[in-house]
Amino acid sequence: MTAATVEAPARYQFKPGPYSSHALLLREFPRHGDGRRVLDIGCASGYLAQILAQRGFSVTGIDLPGTAHPPGIDFVAADLDRGLPALDGSFDFILCADVLEHLREPERLLRACRERLAPEGALIASLPNSGHAYFRGHVLMGRFPQHDRGLFDRTHLRFCTWHGWVDLLTRAGFLIEELHCSGVPVGLALPKWQGSIWVRALERLSYESARAWKSLFAYQFIVRARAERLT
């Protein structure tokens, strides 16, 4: 399925750093797709979908009508707050990158995803950490800013710590098999110095801190989960 695209400035962009959530998400996929099917939910402008398509995956992306998307993927226009649209067949991977926190009923969507997964399929998701030291510091000082993106993204409807995300996935019938923690994408916050030695050092420090103490220093949780078998 295809939909007309409208060129507009992308609100969200690819995070190229080696310790970013996008890099960690992509590592969860096989290097060669061999035609396996991926459903990219909330695909935005398709920066992850395009990379996966180039690896040889068959990618279907879902986002709001009018969202610009790259060639090489099937695009379905839908309002995810109304659930998944009609889709053909099952998927080997379902990708939820930076999307569940934007939904009114993420559990409903996750249950629908569970029904669309192939028997040995995997859900791969990135989940913001509202327990991060930066978030806690603002709340402790009585502030709750509204940013264009990041942990205080003005369009976020869900604010969860690690245990909150585990509870949500469990209720939806998923079992987490792998967890990785991303660091703060310092280069995006300081684009003038992106790629510099000291920005790379700060990103590495943030990543290692997240690995040591995920509840306080993980910027995002990257999880790989499978549907629990019904007994």
Image: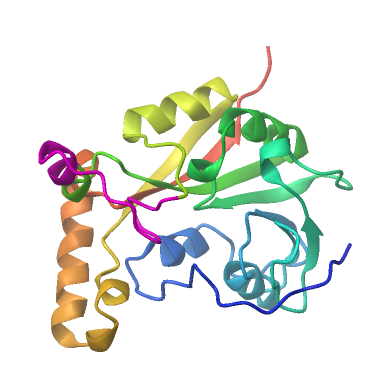
- State the residue in front, 170 or 194: 194
Q: Quadrant for the N terminus, please.
A: bottom right
Instruction: Tell me where residue 77 appears, x and y as whole percent.
Output: 78, 57
The span shown in magenta is 136-154
**Which residue: 61% across, 64% down?**
44
Residue 151 in magenta stretch: yes
**Farthest residue in the left direction?**
141
**Which residue: 65% across, 35% down?**
109
Instruction: Tell me where residue 163 appears, x and y as whole percent.
Output: 34, 28
Rendered view: 122 above or below 163: below
Residue 225: in sight, yes or no? yes
- The colour scheme used to paint the residues is rainbow
Rendered view: 170 above or below 199: above
Our reading of the magenta stretch's main secondary structure is loop
**Which residue: 25% across, 87% down?**
192
Q: Quadrant of residue 60?
A: bottom right
Residue 195: in sight, yes or no? no
Instruction: Tell me where residue 221 appears, x and y as whole percent.
Output: 37, 47
**Farthest residue in the top direction?**
231
